Amino acid sequence: MDYLPLFFDLKQQPCLLVGGGAIACRKARLLLKAGARLRVVAPQVVEEVAAMAAASGGEVLREGYRAAHLEGCILVIAATDNEPLNAQVSADARARKMPVNVVDSPALCSFIMPAIVDRSPLVIGISSGGQAPVLARLLRARIESLVPAAYGRLAGLASRFRERVKAIFTDIDRRRDFWEKNLQGPAAELVFSGREAQAETLLEQQLQQPDTQSPRGEVYLVGAGPGDPDLLTFRALRLMQQADVVLYDRLVSEPVLDLVRRDAERIYVGKRRREHAVPQGDINQLLVDLAARGQRVLRLKGGDPFIFGRGGEEIERLADHHIPFQVVPGITAASGCAAYAGIPLTHRDCAQSVRFVTGHLKDNGANLNWPELAEPGQTLVFYMGLTGLREICRALIDHGRSPQTPAALVEKGTTPVQRVLAADIAGLPQLVAEQDVHAPTLIIIGEVVRLRDKLNWFTPASDRTAASH
Ligand SMILES: C[S@@+](CC[C@H](N)C(=O)[O-])C[C@H]1O[C@@H](n2cnc3c(N)ncnc32)[C@H](O)[C@@H]1O
């Protein structure tokens, strides 16, 4: 190990920053966050740095650096583009045995600044010892995505209960068990989803009856997005990796499913062609039963669970049984398919609103308000519209929408086999009938579809392969 990682308490401590430009600004921000009092020395100091110095209760000296500026400070950072000056600051500080950092010059430093993931009071510092700073930054980005933003609040909760837990669990092993269970179990999830008061109640209950707690299950209703695993949210991924059992259906893509914890039990509850789906009531009950057994249950649904996903019904049953749950939104098919097909869903010139409509037509579409849907100036997105495509286009034309209105059918949107068929609403049904089209498909209707000619950017892997032959 070339450097010993240490965490420095700088609260109210005077620190010298030599330099007043953009680099100094970054360092000033960090020092201010750590509560230091800034003494900034430079002939020119940008407004932001001056403001930070003032906010820290420190001072700005608009003059050239002199060794006397080090007096009374406990550390110094040189952040100028003047190499001889930086070397001078380093030499002066070292002569006084004062910690010194010179930006981008490891040889002149007695300490270096790590890349920081800040979840105060939890702070992670990553250093490559100045050998590969970009690598340290890339690693930081990875950790940023893995550690929930609310980790600091979890640390706060732990700190509030620390003394009481210590008093109740005098045995260190039991104490450790308590914390391990709670810092990665339901209490932690309550904090991450913004329900701190409930997390406190849960810990209180466990402290009052430490020996009678049966394992407590919970359900995560998670939107898996339209197919591309890169479109998952950080929270979705984290819950997918900690669940004990997963219930999923047809719309959840294989690459997304691959990201679920390897040893989690998998239960398929969808419908395959000519087979029956597990009835919704049975799925609702299964969620309750699994959670009641103490399992962390992941209910993974394509797209967003609250958009044509019956997610509401599933959690209603959980609420009736007082099973804790949380809902993680996903990218709905309309957003995913439109983005990957190069079709903005709204546009100032041609679509001031967008409607998500079910294309699952009952009684020849009598359940939809066709006169409203035929109004111009809006984009219509039909989910589950493949079977009823001809009726949908017919009804729109019959109710006054121009037969030349552009439309697109997006097949398996956002996946490597995405296909887009575009025509006007008079011609789309015939075009689709001539192709071998497979679910899932989404239909987008409106002037915005024209923009695709210019804005299409996504080349599915299947097209790339075809082009290279
Ligand atoms: C029962 S709905 C579920 C919608 C989902 N909850 C969502 O927010 O996207 C199923 C319909 O979503 C659409 N869909 C979902 N994923 C799709 C994809 N990758 N490509 C095209 N359409 C998709 C299709 O219209 C499909 O019939």
Image: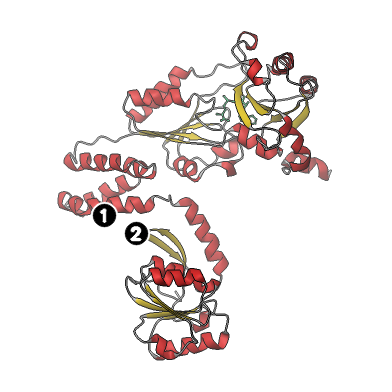
Residue 375 image-quadrant placement: top right
- For the residues labelled 1 and 2, say whether their Cβ atoms are less than 8 Å apart: yes
Residue 414 can be seen, yes or no: no
- Give the image location of residue 22, x and y in percent: 55, 71
Residue drawn at point x = 43 percent, y = 24 percent:
314
Residue 345 image-quadrant placement: top right
Measured in 3D between alpha carbons, the distance from the residue under mark 1 to the one under mark 2, in whole angstroms, is 10 Å
Residue 386 image-quadrant placement: top right
Q: Which amino acid does label 2 sit on?
A: Pro
Looking at this view, is 1 or 73 the one in front?
Answer: 73
Q: Mark 2 points at which residue?
A: 121
- Give the image location of residue 324, x and y in percent: 34, 33
Up the image or down, 194 lies above or below 60; here it is above
Say whether residue 434 is left or right of residue 99: right
Residue drawn at point x = 62 percent, y = 37 percent:
336
Say whether residue 291 is left or right of residue 383: left
Q: Which amino acid does label 1 sit on?
A: Ser
Looking at this view, is 85 or 270 the one in front?
Answer: 85
Looking at this view, is 227 or 247 the one in front?
Answer: 227
Label 2: few (<14), some (14–19) or many (≥20) C-alpha neighbours in 10 Å: few
Q: Mark 1 points at which residue?
A: 159
